[in-house]
Amino acid sequence: MSSSQAPEDQQGGGDPPGDLRSVLVTSVLNLEPLDEDLFRGRHYWVPTTQRLFGGQIVGQALVAAAKSVSEDVHVHSLHCYFVRTGDPKVPVLYQVERTRTGTSFSVRSVKAVQHGKPIFICQASFQQAQPSPLQHQFPMPAVPPPEELLDHEALIDQYLRDPNLQEMYRVGLNRIAAKEVPIEIKLVNPPILSQLQSKEPKQMFWVRARGHIGEGDMKMHCCVAAYISDYAFLGTALLPHQWQCNVHFMVSLDHSMWFHNPFRADHWMLYECESPWAGEYGATRTRVLTLGGRKPAFWGDAALRPQPVGHCTCHFLSCLL
């Protein structure tokens, strides 16, 4: 599954040794071929809900689709629907249909199946790289660099060392700390647990895959980004309602992504999430940016240029207690 190379971007602290391969590449997104355009995926991390993580299904489906196209095309977009709850006790089968193979664009349809029934369907579009004279983008938000922020583990440790922390938070934080999540996250504005209050449905955080992926396979970086994309969608929509209702569970209904520029999913990416609406169901959208070019000695140098990786949207359903 080779394609155009990811940029030689040293942003994000450089490459770790090659033997520290990201578990997302070696395990989560490493599908077993069963027949032509038929693959089996297994599970690495299962959330406390004991349902399959939606990002895993999106990422694995994109891997299956990418294996059916030529090496000289890259991922343009994907549009997905979650139709049934995934069962973490059995593998997922991915069936690929070669909907169209054109000169510039190709389309693949993927169906994820468990117990003989589809749990997820998606269409992925691939295209030949083509230069365009029309280019514009929103500016990079003014945020601290990831090097100045606490990672999830350090942030949780800081919370747990607070002697005044309420027991319900302590139990929840210990449960989160015990998870082996294959991504690293640094919140731009982490909450103060003793001063929790309703907020705007917006948040920003830096994220990257744990371990090393390398530059060679741009399609794989897109698949890793697809895995990551479903991680913080739903929580963004809850920010204005923290004290108004007790949400029992939330599930993704549909999910779309567009990829704009080459990037590396094992380097830091800024996720800018917002939820513009919530009612019978909710909607969340995310813009993802990296910093292109060589990283200067300090943040904000003119040599830094924001590079949009892409954007994604999600609709979801919540169940209230």
Image (cartoon, rainbow, N blue to C red):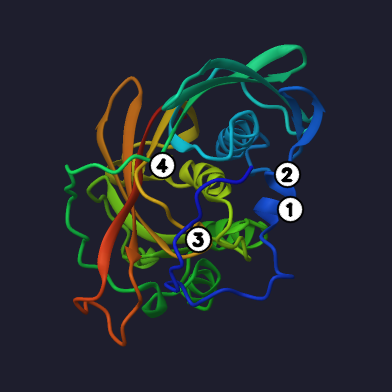
- Which SS class for mark 3? strand
Q: CA distance from mark 3 to mark 1?
A: 16 Å
- Give the amino acid at mark 1: Thr
Residue under circle 4?
A: 233
- Give the amino acid at mark 3: Arg
Sequence-first disc among 4 and 2: 2
Q: Residue at x 18, y 44 (%)?
A: 133
Crowdedness near tag 1: few (<14), some (14–19) or many (≥20) residues, C-alpha within 10 Å: few
Residue under circle 3?
A: 208
- Which SS class for mark 4? helix
Decide if residue 83 is in sight here: yes
Residue 196 location (% of width, % of height) = 32, 59
Of tags 2 and 3, the one toward the viewer is 2
Residue 258 location (% of width, % of height) = 37, 36
Left or right: 189, with 219 as reference point: left
- Which SS class for mark 1? helix
Sequence-first disc among 3 and 1: 1
- Labels 1 and 2 touching (C-beta < 8 A): yes
Left or right: 48, with 185 as reference point: right
Q: CA distance from mark 4 to mark 1?
A: 25 Å
Of tags 4 and 2, the one toward the viewer is 2
Residue 146 is labelled as none
Residue 30 is labelled as 2
Q: Residue at x 44, y 47 (%)?
A: 232
Looking at the image, the residue that sits furthest to the front is: 103
Q: Quadrant of the N terminus?
A: top right
Crowdedness near tag 2: few (<14), some (14–19) or many (≥20) residues, C-alpha within 10 Å: some
Left or right: 86, with 3 as reference point: right
Looking at the image, the residue that sits furthest to the right is: 34
Residue 26 is labelled as 1
Residue 66 location (% of width, % of height) = 59, 34
Q: Residue at x 20, y 67 (%)?
A: 142
